[in-house]
Image (tube, grey):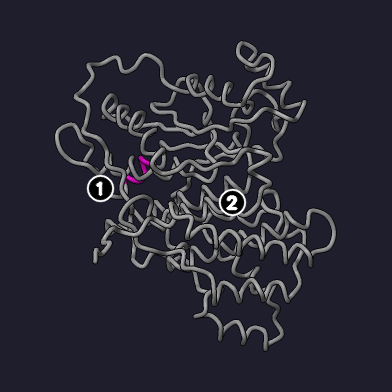
Amino acid sequence: MTVDTAAPPNPVDSTAFTKPLIRALQAQIDQMAATIGGKDTHLIAAAWVYSSVLVAWCEDHGLIETRLRKEAKARREEHLAEGGTMAGWLGDAFASLTVHPSTACLLDPRYTPVAQGTPSEAACRTLVDWWSSDAPELAYEVEKGPASITGWLAGDMLQLVTSDRRLANALCQTPWWICDFLLERTLVPAAGEWPRDLLRVIDPACGTGHLLVWALIGLYQWYRSTGRGRPGLAPEPAMRRAMAGLHGVELDPLTAAVARLRLLVTAGALLAGDGALPTPLRLHQIPATLRPRIAVGNALLAGQGDPCPPGTVLDDTADYPNILQRGTYHAVVANPPYITVKDPKVNKAIRAAYSNVCTGQYSLSVPFAVLTFELAIRGGHTASTPERPEQLDLFEP
């Protein structure tokens, strides 16, 4: 008999893991939506259920106090016996995600519709009971691909549990091996050409942050690396440089908020792994100075005089000075949406801004391709180019 000793697949690559999880979450959304009155019931229910995904992911990694898993059952029952509600318990769980300045937006009504409706007590209890008994662990060991602490699975779930963002904004996360491919051809040569510079990297269509998380790991590794021509920095200054040079822009506010959370946690995990933060890592102990530079807005149109470009519900790009300044990035990497523009106002504005390429019926990938080259530094370094470093091995924190 032959024994299969191959390592199990990373859960982010395994439909045997993701499909049952997606079906269960979609069922929870449908049940909750049926109990919420008013408009946009499905969007509100999806926000409640997806927020619970983020809570469970953080709980499973010890980042916040446990509220959804079975270890908190006695405390939940005590809360109910004292007159509390399960909806209130969930609300407190959601609030535990907002203890850092970079994650406060997760309950901001401009980012999420959670506050626009409240599911029934029965629906809330069903959701909590599912997380307590039947839901899979979101912390797991991997031999290849992104570690669970990076929130890769949680980022994927935003596009998979509901079709709204996938259909409206073409939210489709980039597989990690494609992130590898893109960064090996952008970030790695940039490190070789500008070894002494603070490397500026941007994803102008960053989604929940897959490419940015992978780039953060690579940047941190580069700044920590030693040897001829290497920075060789201590953990804290290495992370400060990595975070200072990493930028993203995302149209959908909740999607951007998730990217901020994931980058923050990944940064904390890298520092904790190098002994620069206490272990086990707690969300509230990550320094407030670590602030992911991810703006909400339409990267194609932001910064052109309109404080809220067509098609955006929120634009805070002005809070991140020069985030879309042309010709300033050493590496520009993106997996932009491949859809046509449905909104007439947005269509008109993009045609005007990219009149040389947006003629007839065009895909959004066309103006994004133009933007990508415009954001990049042109012409390379004027000094003699140093020897290209060996390939950065993007690792799991």
* Residue type indicated by callout 2: Leu
Secondary structure state at the residue bearing disc 2: helix
100 to 182, vertically: above or below:
below
Asked whether 215 falls inside the magenta stretch, the response is: no
- Which residue is identified by label 2? 160
Mark sitting on residue 30: none
Whole-percent x and y of residue 115? 73, 60
Question: What residue lies at 49% left-to-right and 44% top-to-bottom?
Answer: 209
- Which residue is identified by label 1? 234
Name of the residue lying farthest toward the top: 356
Q: Which is nearer the eye, 205 or 10?
A: 10
- Residues rendered magenta in the picture: 237-242
- How far apart are the alpha carbons under marks 2 and 1? 39 Å
Q: Quadrant of residue 312?
A: top right
Quarter of the picture containing the N terminus is: bottom left
Q: Which is nearer the eye, 355 or 82?
A: 355
* Residue type indicated by callout 1: Ala
Whole-percent x and y of residue 37? 83, 63
Name of the residue lying farthest toward the left: 228
